[in-house]
Each structure stands twice: as structure tokens, then as C-alpha cells.
Amino acid sequence: MKRLIIVCLFFHLSLLVKSQQYLTSEIRLKGDSIMRKILGDTIFSNNSIYDSTSRYFYWRKGVCLGGTLTKEIKTKGKFSNAFISYYLSIPYPSCKPYSLMKFNVTLILNKNLFLEKAPELGFIPDSYWKNIECEIIDKEVAISLARQQNLKPGIDSLKTSIYYSLEKKKLVWSVSHILSEETKIAFKTVPYKVSTVEEIIIDAASGNVISQRIYQLSPMY
């Protein structure tokens, strides 16, 4: 009899696990709560912008499927995990080169809606959290350093952008220009341009040149 009770309890629990479901609003609220703890309530409240790629995943008949988190629905099947993506824009007025920090943060929640691992936040400099002046070289300095790298003659002016490199785990300046352009034909009738680009990557804090490369850039079809 005792064995029968244990088997019945196990079967009942397995049914509960199989039927584990959440409201998508519940999943988003859990993600919001985690983000508030990480960034602070004031910063996050002004930046709670969901990316349309935010999704949850579930199992049905041994197949892993996905559903959107942007609609007010109940999740399907046996819930597996969720990827919640946020687009954030944080003003940093005391840092002229990086006065508006724009980035994407993705939270991964497990089947119990616990955070699987801490999100990547290296794109926010330590100086921001310490409320001190940033130690990032200006755009003009980055351009000057790039010009010292024996650049090839180009057909346009140097363009700059600053971003957080996931590979290098640091903020970097990208200084680039187009060397040449060539028109090609796709699908026998659609013309498009292929640009040959030279790019210099510079450590935004130290000013050290990290890499220099030439690559081709073309539209995606």
C-alpha cells in the first residue's frame, strides 16, 4: 500500500512538471525584477523596452518549440526556459565620448524562472557606477591614432563608432573608411554594392591599437 501511494505521488508530481506553465506577463515581470536589482529602479524604469525577439521555449512530444513573450498569453507545453531581451539607453553626460550608452541585455531564465547566469554588463564603465569622469579617449584622438597606422587611400572620410566588444571584454573605438565599391547583380536583376572597408579597432581606455583589417561589406539577402 505504501509503495502504491509513493507511485501515485510520483505520477502526480510528474503531471505537474509536465503541465508547468506561466503567463508571459509573469515571465516579463520576473525579468523586470532582476533588471531593477542590477541597474537600479530609476535607470530601469526609464528603459524597459522589450526586444521583439524575446522568446520562451517549451517541450512538446520530445520537440523543443518556441513562443513569443511580447503577447499576453499562457505558455504552452512543458516550459523549458526564457530569453528576455531589453534595449537600454542610459545617459552619461559627464562622459563626452560615450554620453549615451545604448546596448542590448539578454536575461536567460530557467524552468523555475531563476536567472541562469549574470548578464553581460561590461559596456557600462566602472566610472559610471562610481559617478566620476570617464577615462575614454575622444573621437578625435581615436582618428589621429588610426591615421598613424599607414591607412590605404580611401574614397570617403573616416567614420567612427564606440561599442563594447564581447570578444575583448572592453570598450573600443572603430575607425573605418571605404577603400572601393563594386556593383554586382543578385538574382540576375537586382543590383547591389559591395564595399571594401579598412577598419582600425582601438582600446577606448588606453588608446592601444588592437587590430587592423580589410574586409568586404555587402547587403544581406
Image (tube, rainbow, N blue to C red):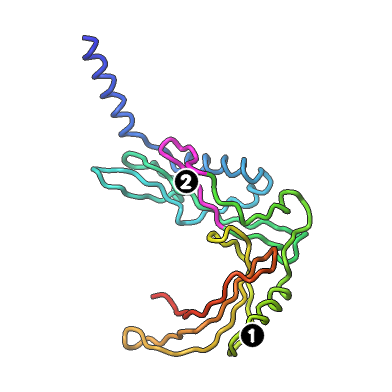
Estimate the x, y position of residue 136 in percent, counting from the top left: 72, 64
Picture disc at residue 157: 1
Residue 165, above or below 7: below
Residue 16, above or below 120: above
Q: Secondary structure at mark 1?
A: loop
Horizontal side of residue 202 vs 17, given as left or right? right
Residue at image position (71%, 49%) is 129
Residue at image position (48%, 49%) is 84
Estimate the x, y position of residue 1 in percent, counting from the top left: 21, 9
Residue at image position (45%, 56%) is 53
* Residue 112 placement: quadrant: top left
Q: How far is disc 1 from disc 2 in space, using C-alphas?
A: 41 Å
Q: Which residue is under mark 2?
A: 108
Horizontal side of residue 40 vs 69, given as left or right? right
Q: Is residue 113 magenta?
A: yes
Estimate the x, y position of residue 61 in percent, counting from the top left: 23, 43
Front position in the image: 9 or 67: 9
- Magenta segment: 104-117
